[in-house]
Amino acid sequence: MEYVTVTALSHPGLLREHNEDSLVAGPWTLCGTMTENPQTLVFPLGTPLVVAVADGIGGQPAGEVASALAVRQLAALGPSLDTEEAVRDALNLCNDAVYAAGRAPELNTMGTTVAGAVVLAESLLVFNVGDSRVLDATADGLRQVSVDDSPPLSPGRRTTSLVTQALGGTPDFSAITPHVREAPLSAGDRYLVCTDGLTDPVPEDALNDLLQLHSGGRAAFELWKSAIEAGGPDNITLALIAIGE
């Protein structure tokens, strides 16, 4: 039987007081906490399997609440996410949920990015809102398959903390335009889903080198370590999806 492994890790990094990231893998969620070691889950290939990270917007209240709302909504809807349209509808429901909770004064303007994939029997539905990423770890190198919602970079800059859309994040409701695309799937494929706490401090070529050398829990650990060695300036959350047979 073909199967899917998901190896996940979430850590606050070295500079943040707490973790505002959340993660979902099937029915399993990890919200605003820390995993000392990578956790590997195994799922049968067939029923839609959602794997996603959400990064609460820093500098605004309750980012951890917004990111947890998003992943828990996706966990509940996961088995029904079998088309691009279903994924778009689910992300719009996540946006609605964040704004509805944000009516409480202490939660107003909270927001989160989200990025992930739904693993189907023969394909993958990649999605994102914001600047968390999905990367295809091919034998030829790492290839980004999500779309960053970020303003153009100024000369000499590789990263920015600004986003042009998110779930929530503004005082008044703002609709989203989710990025959703379908990609073929076959045994041996690997995808990295992560927040910018990994991709901002660690260049893509360094991430690729680690993924060429390692897999599973060792790969997740080495990716996390690379962000820590780069200063760990932000929360670090990642999930490695691998298709086996």
Image: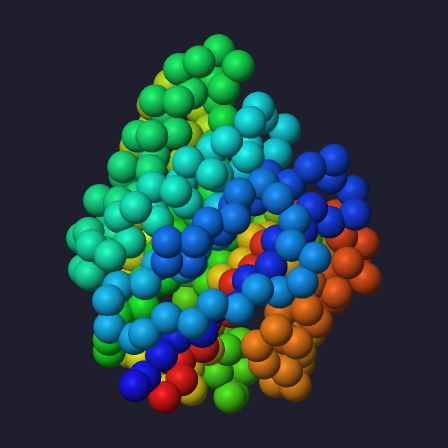
Q: Residue at x 24, y 67 (%)?
A: 47
Residue 171 image offset from top left, x and y in percent: 43, 18
Residue 221 image offset from top left, x and y in percent: 68, 69
Residue 28 image offset from top left, x and y in percent: 43, 53
107, 80: nearer the viewer: 80
Residue 165: quarter of image = top left
Residue 228: quarter of image = bottom right
In the displayed orientation, state which residue is furthest to the top.
105
Left or right of 204? Residue 109 is left
Q: Quadrant of the N terminus?
A: bottom left
Q: Is residue 189 visible?
A: yes
Q: Residue at x 41, y 45 (%)?
A: 71
Q: Residue at x 41, y 36 (%)?
A: 69
Residue 88 image offset from top left, x and y in percent: 25, 48
Compared to residue 97, the image places residue 190 above or below, namely below
Which color scheme did the rendering employ for the protein? rainbow
Left or right of 167? Residue 56 is right
Number of numbered discs on residues:
0
Q: Quadrant of the C terminus?
A: bottom left
Left or right of 45? Residue 160 is right
Q: Residue at x 47, y 33 (%)?
A: 66
Q: Is residue 199 visible?
A: no
108, 218: nearer the viewer: 218
